[in-house]
Amino acid sequence: GAAVTPVARGFRAFAFGASSALVSSPCSTPVLASLLGFVVASGETDSALGLGLLLAYTLGYTTPVVAAGALGTAATSALSHRGSEASELVVPVFGGGLVAYGVYSSLVVLLPA
């Protein structure tokens, strides 16, 4: 394929982030607003709890995307060094994995056991 320029790579990263924010905002904004409201209402007496809750929220929110990105990059790099055509399948496979994780997470909440 054609070489991807740094500008195009940066634009793709920006577009991915923007589209992720657009899709996830309706789901995450109420949770974050509630969490921030709780932290503000607890005042300065329990700032460690507020910090812990916000840190836990951040880790839970970003870990799946960071993990998929890191594993996808490692897989693409490993396959492309071998000269394999399979490296072109990495992005769709990891993208499908993120979608599957989102569907699973939604179904667990919507259809409790």
Image: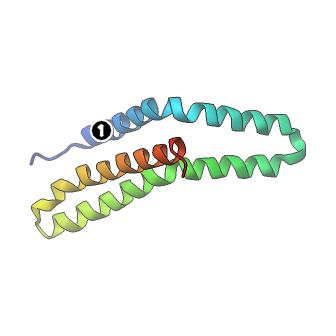
**Label 1: element kind:** helix
The residue located at (10%, 66%) in the rendering is: 83
- x, y percent for residue 2: 10, 45
The residue located at (67%, 32%) in the rendering is: 33
Q: Is residue 63 left or right of residue 103?
A: right
The residue carrying mark 1 is 12
Q: Is residue 17 left or right of residue 85?
A: right
**Residue 32 or residue 82, whichever sits in front:** 32
Furthest-bottom residue in this view? 82
**Residue 20 or residue 104, whichever sits in front:** 104
The residue located at (43%, 32%) in the rendering is: 23
Q: Is residue 86 left or right of residue 61?
A: left
The number of numbered discs placed on residues in the rendered structure image is: 1
Residue density around tag 1, few if under 14, some if 14–19, many if 20 or more, within 10 Å: few
Q: Amino acid at mark 1?
A: Arg
Furthest-front residue in this view? 113
Q: Is 64 located above or below residue 4 in the figure? A: below
- x, y percent for residue 61: 54, 47
**Residue 18 or residue 28, whichever sits in front:** 28
Quadrant location of residue 77?
A: bottom left
- x, y percent for residue 35: 70, 38
The residue located at (27%, 43%) in the rendering is: 6
Q: Is 112 located above or below residue 73 in the figure? A: above
Q: Is 69 located above or below residue 77 in the figure? A: above
